[in-house]
Image: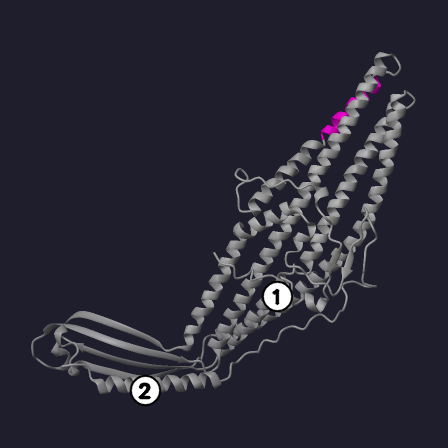
Amino acid sequence: MGVDPAGMNGLLRWAARGCCAAALLAMSGCAVGPDFVRPKPPPVGAYDRGPAPNTTIPADGQAQHFLREAAFPSDWWRLFNSAALDTVIEQAIADNLSLRASQASLRRSQESLRAGYGVFFPQLDAGFDATRQKFSPARFGSSTPSSIFSLYTLSATVNYPLDLFGGERRALEGLSAQVDAQRDAVLASYLALTSNIVNTVIARAAYGAEIKALEEVIGLEKNQVRISQAQAQAGLIPYVNVLSLQSQVAATEATLPPLRQKLSQSDHLLSTLAGRAPAEWAPPDVDLADLTLPGDLPVSLPSELVRRRPDILAAEAQLHEASASIGVATAALFPSVTLNGTYGQNNAPISDLLKKTGNFWSLGADLSTPLFHGGTLWFQRKAAIEGYRQSQNDYRQTVLDALAQVADALRALEHDAESLQAQLQALNASQRALQLVQANFKAGVAGYVQVLIANDQYARAKIGYLESRAQRFQDTVALFVALGGGWWNAPAIADNSH
């Protein structure tokens, strides 16, 4: 009693030889569909017409320089020299839920790719069946009585599909491209997270500075009200002047609540970016004066930009996936071959299951070729080709958008310096004018209308100056982001887990 060793060994030898031959045939066979070729960089050497800017004018005591060969720091936010800002970013990188979700999506695509490699191995399955049957000899023209018995079957099957036309290889190529796209999506999430934090911290600091400036102006205006009240009581000016100044104070105070609301919204946004509820976490205070404006800014060439920006790399990976889809759809038009083998034992009493008399096996190959599917396979291939053309145009548009964003950021920094310098001059002039009007008003030789005008001009100049400073900081952030964020000089970001 026992399994037929000759039959089993013969089947295994045949299966091994067949699988080796099939693997060699599959690897040497052609893979239909286009082979992906990486798009060439754009044929431009600059981001804008005219000479490339090398530096900005000095504004508020500092110029910014654009360096073509400078190293791009991966932790570019440290150039702002704010320990509090660094702390918020470190916490957000560790705890931000959107970044964690992107990393989980990457790991999922990596596991799907590993699963896809299984198609290149023989598929071996084992089975055990137990059935209760009634056999009727009358089906075969016999008059013997029917019998009832139990049948037990133990079997193993081997299947190996031959990838003769490369459909499976193209499908695996598409899965690999999906991994690349997800990795680039993680990099994009990382870049968006860090830039959002820096921009929010800058905006929050600007709101705080504007609130302090308005409170200073309100203090000056209230002092002018007290002086005007004393002058009205002495009969030097009409009381309507006092009312006009009080109205000015109220109008200035009305601008504070919207700024305080924006300040609160900034706190709440920073909390969520750091992976915390607003009620359980408060961001550290950062003053606008505590931030250092980076003076030397690295600027890469357009040919380097298309190999570094995460959104361009993601669009390239999607183009690669679309190219592989053409191969999958094309391979579906050709025949498919599958090698298969089965070996097993069956018998009526389970105690005799392994006897030689119950041995069975089969070897074979299945050939299937599409003949008529109502045009489905043909039009699926045409749809894949159009999908590739769509991805091509999406890629080109992404590149154009990236080039425009860098050009915008470079010109913005030039104009920011000019605007800030003009705002600083306006602030200094309005401050001197206000001091003169205050002195004349206190001496009784200036009217309240002059005071109102001087107050309004100083308040506007102060707010304009602070907004210009903040804008210069934020456009500096925009340049770092537009150039890709320097992730290529950082430790592994995309593969950070859990």
Residue sitting at x 63%, y 63%: 489
Q: Residues within 10 Å of mark 2 (few under 14, many from 20)?
A: some
Counting residues from the N terminus, which is met first, the one under dot 2 or under dot 1?
2
Quarter in which the N terminus is drawn: bottom left
Q: Position of residue 257 (x, y in %)?
A: 67, 32
Whether residue 324 sits left or right of residue 157 in the image: it is right
Residue 479: quadrant of the picture: bottom right
Number of labels in the image equals 2
Residue sitting at x 59%, y 64%: 314
Residue 268: quadrant of the picture: top right
Q: Secondary structure at mark 2?
A: helix
Q: CA distance from mark 2 to mark 1?
A: 46 Å
Q: Is residue 248 visible?
A: no
Which residues are drawn in magenta? 240-254
Q: Which residue is mark 2?
A: 14
Q: Which residue is mark 1?
A: 313
Q: Is residue 487 magenta?
A: no
Residue 184: quadrant of the picture: bottom right
Whether residue 232 sits left or right of residue 255 in the image: it is right
